[in-house]
Image (cartoon, rainbow, N blue to C red):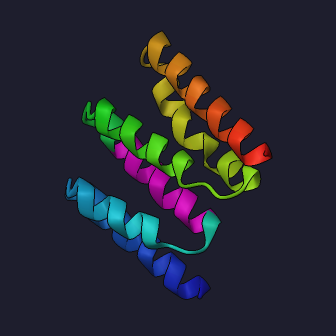
Amino acid sequence: SDQKARALQALATAVAQAQQWEQAREVATSIEESDQKVRALQELVTALVTVNEHELALHIVQQTWLQAETRAYALKMFPLACGLISLNPEVGRGLYEAFRWVDSFLRK
């Protein structure tokens, strides 16, 4: 299981480096082990920000939070947003609102 997660993370990274964004997202989100998934998604979001694909990076972060089933998982995914917050104050506010909504929903 751990070897599979590491292999999928490496695959997601390679696909992201080839700028095959949708395929990289699919591979990264298929990883079951949450720490490996966070790393793969972080590498994807970082790659997207590097090539100015900010909107797609933001979409991936939002979708990841919306799919969170626990508060702990949502908090693990929070670092995905760090590279986006500095880009634009509005992005930071939007991410804050999205995270606040997910957090309040998961507390219920």
Position of residue 34 in the picture relative to residue 81 (left or right): right
x and y percent of residue 66 in the render? 53, 47
The main secondary structure of the magenta stretch is helix
Which residue appears at 61% of the width and 49% of the height? 77
Q: How many marks?
A: 0
x and y percent of residue 13 in the render? 36, 62
Q: Considering depth in this image, is 56 or 44 the residue closer to the camera?
A: 56
- Which of the 4 quarters of the picture holds residue 29? bottom left
Which residue appears at 53% of the width and 64% of the height? 37
Position of residue 73 in the picture relative to residue 1 (left or right): right
Position of residue 78 in the picture relative to residue 48 (left or right): right
Question: Seen from this angle, which residue lies furthest top?
Answer: 89
Query: Looking at the figure, which quarter contains the C terminus?
Result: top right
x and y percent of residue 73 in the render? 68, 55
Question: Seen from this angle, which residue lies furthest right?
Answer: 107
Q: Considering depth in this image, is 35 or 72 the residue closer to the camera?
A: 72
Q: Is residue 17 above or below residue 102?
A: below
Q: Is residue 43 magenta?
A: yes
Q: Considering depth in this image, is 69 or 1 the residue closer to the camera?
A: 69
Q: Is residue 91 above or below residue 107?
A: above
Query: Looking at the figure, which quarter contains the N terminus?
Result: bottom right
Q: Is residue 33 above or below residue 13?
A: below
Q: Is residue 89 magenta?
A: no
Which residue appears at 31% of the width and 32% of the height? 55
Which residue appears at 54% of the width and 27% of the height? 95
Q: Is residue 7 above or below residue 67?
A: below
What residue range appears in magenta?
35-47
x and y percent of residue 70 in the render? 72, 56
